[in-house]
Amino acid sequence: QVQLVESGGGLVQPGGSLTLSCTASRSSFGIYTMAWYRQAPGNQREVIAHISISGDSSYADSVKGRFTVSRDDANNVMYLQMNSLKPEDTAVYYCNRPTNSGNFGWWPWGPGTQVTVSS
């Protein structure tokens, strides 16, 4: 059973930056496309970024140009560099291996990491 742990969240002012990390317990992490998700209060969880095993990435329109996803397969870690943060980026952020459709993940969800953007 894969365990996912997200970290790096916190309180940041609008316009600021944060880098999130996702650590997976599975040594075969590197053979899967991975994704970052977020869930804002009162909203459903949504996928915001994907990264393939070759490093190709794609982003939701809401974060495109501001967020960058990367991965370190040797250490089973995925990152999300978040720049120019906005209050609407406030959410709990999660990582997972994405399913083919929807905002779902194959593996059990980790605890997430809270990002709060506020002055």
Image: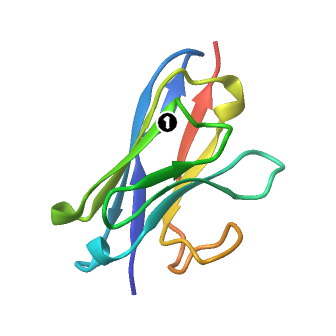
Q: Residue furthest left?
A: 74
Q: Disc 1 marks which residue?
A: 67
Where disc 1 sits, the SS reads: strand
x then y, percent, for residue 43? 81, 51
Horizontal side of residue 70 vs 107, given as left or right: left
Q: Can see residue 25?
A: no
Give the side of residue 42 with respect to residue 57, left or right: right
**Taking 30 as reference, is 65 above or below it?**
above
Residue 2 spot, x, y in % from top left: 38, 80
Colour mapping: rainbow
**Residue 109 visible in the displayed image:** yes
Name the residue located 72 percent from the left edge and 30 percent from the top edge: 88
- In the rendered image, the quadrant that contains the N terminus is bottom left
| Residue 27 quadrant | bottom left
User: Where residue 71 sits in the image (x, y, percent)?
Assistant: 30, 55
Q: Amino acid at mark 1?
A: Phe
Q: Quadrant of the C terminus?
A: top right
100 vs 29, nearest the viewer? 100
Residue located 52% across and 29% down the image: 66
- Which residue is at 33% across, 57% downward? 55
Up-down: is 66 above or below 68? above
Residue found farthest to the bottom: 1
Q: 97 left or right of 103?
A: left
Image coordinates of residue 58 in percent, x first then y, are 52, 51
